[in-house]
Amino acid sequence: MNQPVMDWPESLMPDAFRGLDVLRSVSARGQKAAGLLLQHGIWNELAGFDPIVAGTFPINLDIVGSDVDILCYCPDADGLEARVQTSFGYLDGFGLHHRPATQHVGSAIVVRFVLDDLPVEIFATGTPSQSQFGFRHMLVEARVIALLGERFASDIRQLKRGGVKTEPAFARLLKLGGDPYIALDGLYELGPDALRDRVMAAINP
C-alpha cells in the first residue's frame, strides 16, 4: 500500500506569511517592526503592491542591524516609484535606486529608509511577491528550521554575526554546493519527508 505523501502544515505554507501576523508573533523585535510599519503608514501605502515581509525577521533569524525586507509586486514601476517618493521621501535615510536585471532576477526598484532605529528595504519587481527568490528562500529557511530546531537557527545567527549572509550561511551548514541562492531555491518544492532526508544527510553524513 502506498504511504500518504505528507505536506507542510499551514504555518509553513506560502499564504501564512501574508499580512503582519507572523511578524507580530515571532519576537519582540518583530512585534516592534510590525507596529512601526503600521504607525508610519508603510503597510497601507504598499497595500496595492502585494507586500510581503520576507528575510530574517519573520523567521526569527534577525540580528542587530538586520533590515526589515518587504517584497512588492509592481508591473507598473512608475506607479510604485511615484507612490514611495511621495509617501516615504521624508523618512530618515530615504533612498531609491533601480537595480538592473540579473540572470535570475528581473530589474527591481529598491527603496531604503529608517523607522526609528530600524532599517527597512523594499524590493519591488514585476514578479509576484510569492514567486520572488527572496520569498522562496525564506520559506525554505523556515521549513529547515522547523525540521532542525533552535540549535540550527542559533548556528545560522552566529554565522550572520560573523558577516555571512543568510543564504550562504544555510548553504554552508547544509553543505549545498554551487551558487547558494540557486541551491536553496532548489529545495523549495520538496515536501517535509524529502527535505528532511536532504538536510539530515547533509548534517549527519
Image (cartoon, helix red, strand yellow):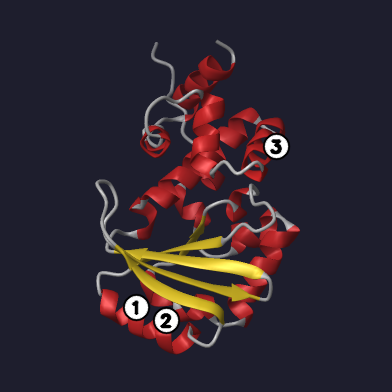
The disc, 3 or 1, on the residue closer to the chain's N-terminal end is 1
CA gap, disc 3 and disc 2 = 35 Å
Amino acid on which the number 1 mark rests in the picture: Leu
Q: Which residue is mark 1?
A: 80
Q: Is residue 26 above or below residue 152?
A: below
**Residue 154, numbered circle:** 3
The image position of residue 48, as x and y in percent, is 38, 76
Given residues 68 and 11, the one toward you in this image is: 68
Q: Residue at x 38, y 84 (%)?
A: 83
Q: Are marks 2 and 1 in contact (CB under 8 Å)?
A: yes
Q: Quadrant of the C terminus?
A: top right
User: On the rendered structure, is 108 left or right of 61?
Assistant: left
Amino acid on which the number 3 mark rests in the picture: Ser
- Disc 2 on helix, strand or loop? helix
Q: Quadrant of the N terminus?
A: top left
Q: Which residue is mark 2?
A: 84
Q: Residue at x 49, y 29 (%)?
A: 192
The image position of residue 164, as x and y in percent, is 57, 41
Amino acid on which the number 2 mark rests in the picture: Val
- Disc 3 on helix, strand or loop? helix
Residue 9 visible in the snapshot: no
> Which residue is most to the right?
28
CA gap, disc 2 and disc 1 = 6 Å
Q: Residue at x 67, y 60 (%)?
A: 30
